[in-house]
Amino acid sequence: MDQIIVHGNGPLKGEIPIAGAKNACLTLMPATLLTDQPLTLTNAPRLSDIRTMTELLQSLGAEATSLQDGQVLAMSSHDLTSQRADYDIVRKMRASILVLGPLLARHGQAEVSLPGGCAIGARPVDLHLKALEAMGAELDLRDGYVHARAPLGGLTGAVVEFPIVSVGATENALMAATLARGTTVLKNAAREPEIVDLAQCLRRMGARIEGEGTGTITIEGVDALHGATHPVVTDRIELGTYMLAPAMCGGEVECLGGRIDLLAAFCDKLDQAGLSVEETPRGLKVARSNGRVRAVDVTTEPYPGFPTDLQAQFMALMCMAEGTSVLEETIFENRFMHAPELARMGAQIEVHGGHATVTGVQQLRGAPVMATDLRASVSLILAGMAAEGQTTVSRVYHLDRGYEHVVRKLRGVGAHIERVREE
Ligand code: UD1
């Protein structure tokens, strides 16, 4: 297995291109199941999660080909041969559940393995199932699978009010509703940019959708969708992660393709911490000129709040801030696994339930550390870049799920980082 070796760094300088969003791409890809015509995605990220979704679509009989070095995904679901998403693929990636709504809507049935728990919490799929049930689906949970069937005339439009905001459940329900008979209203829907991107793509495919980006999305079902070409929205989490690199090490980095509107709450926190964030014609430029950043409290929330997927990386920054900050995690119940790893590097962190209290130190020290999940792994790299000495991050396969060419991108702005095979 590979390891990433990072050496403490001076100020960074240069630019980092930001890829298309993993989480948007993972919901846009299953949208191909809604039509028998080709769907092409441009600006796709090159990630192992995207390869897993490709494998899943292919296992259903869809064609999914990656072109132009992986940046274009050409898909077609003309002749599906299966409606079963197997445990072997679903266990690798929870987002596999996103084939359920489209399969049910266009093919009337689906069997999808239940994803099970994951490192950051129990993460059930009950809200996905309730939304589809409200549209008339009959569901049966047995042998670790959801066996779903649409009524004879297909799914029907319904009013679905989500008790809590769920990105995945909103996406599954939105996709299913495009082909349901009549009107569906999704209340307390997720407002994430990835949902807006999905709605825009579905609209290009002929769907009738209004209200995406607000808490209420209205979908007027149509008989069939057609093919389209759609560019994947910028990855706001990759963007936020790389914006933290100059915040940690000093210097100035321009993130190409970055937009403040994707990350307004996060940019506010960077501002409060004393960093400068500037919009440029090509993206966002972040600079830290001198001195330590200030401690800032953060609470993770659904969009437009501070994203849970940037909590680990922001904690790395707070480990070096002047003062004490409290980071509150409200989305997932077990999302501080990076804290003990950061503590191995000299960070002072106390975790009590959903709160982590971080007291900044003058200097982190390099150490061997272990990546526990996708975002945790990149927080350890950021910490390593600001630490004295060498940090070795193992289990980097987590990183490959969500960050393309991380070593190349960080080396491009002057980071001392390399990937090696573990001996
Ligand atoms: C998506 C993102 C993930 C991000 C998360 C929150 C993808 C592929 N992943 O995950 O990176 O961290 O949004 O922004 O887009 N819940 C239930 N029942 C359900 C569904 C969710 O209780 O049926 C709970 C979850 O356990 C969690 C909360 O709702 O506590 C929010 O989860 P959700 O928004 O659904 O996250 P995902 O779509 O899985």
Image (tube, rainbow, N blue to C red):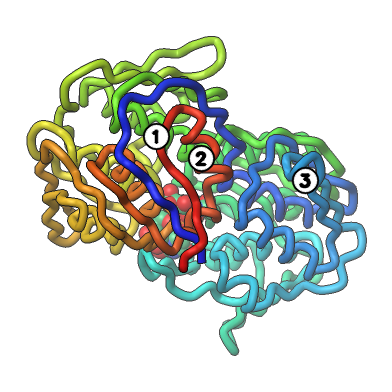
Numbered circle sitting on residue 73: 3
Q: Distance of mark 3 from mark 1, alpha carbons? A: 29 Å
Depth check: 44 or 342 in front?
342
Mark 1 surroundings within 10 Å by alpha-carbon count, few (fewer than 14), some (14 through 19), many (20 or more): some
Q: Is residue 388 above or below residue 130?
A: above
| Precedes in sequence: disc 3 or disc 2 | 3
Q: Distance of mark 1 from mark 2, alpha carbons? A: 15 Å
Q: Is residue 95 left or right of residue 413?
A: right
Numbered circle sitting on residue 216: 2
- Residue sitting at 74 percent across and 71 percent down? 151
What SS does tag 3 mark? strand
- Residue sitting at 43 percent across and 43 percent down? 417
Depth check: 380 or 366 in front?
366
- Residue sitting at 16 percent across and 21 percent down? 291
What SS does tag 2 mark? strand
| Precedes in sequence: disc 1 or disc 2 | 2
- Where on the picture, by quarter, is residue 207? top right
Q: Distance of mark 3 from mark 2, alpha carbons? A: 30 Å
Question: Label 3 sits on what residue type?
Answer: Leu
Query: From this viewpoint, which residue is outermost toward the front?
Result: 423
Depth check: 385 or 55 in front?
385
Question: Label 2 sits on what residue type?
Answer: Thr
Q: Give the mark toward the camera: 3 or 2.
A: 3
List the residue tagged with mark 1: 304
Mark 2 surroundings within 10 Å by alpha-carbon count, few (fewer than 14), some (14 through 19), many (20 or more): some
Q: Give the mark toward the camera: 1 or 2.
A: 1
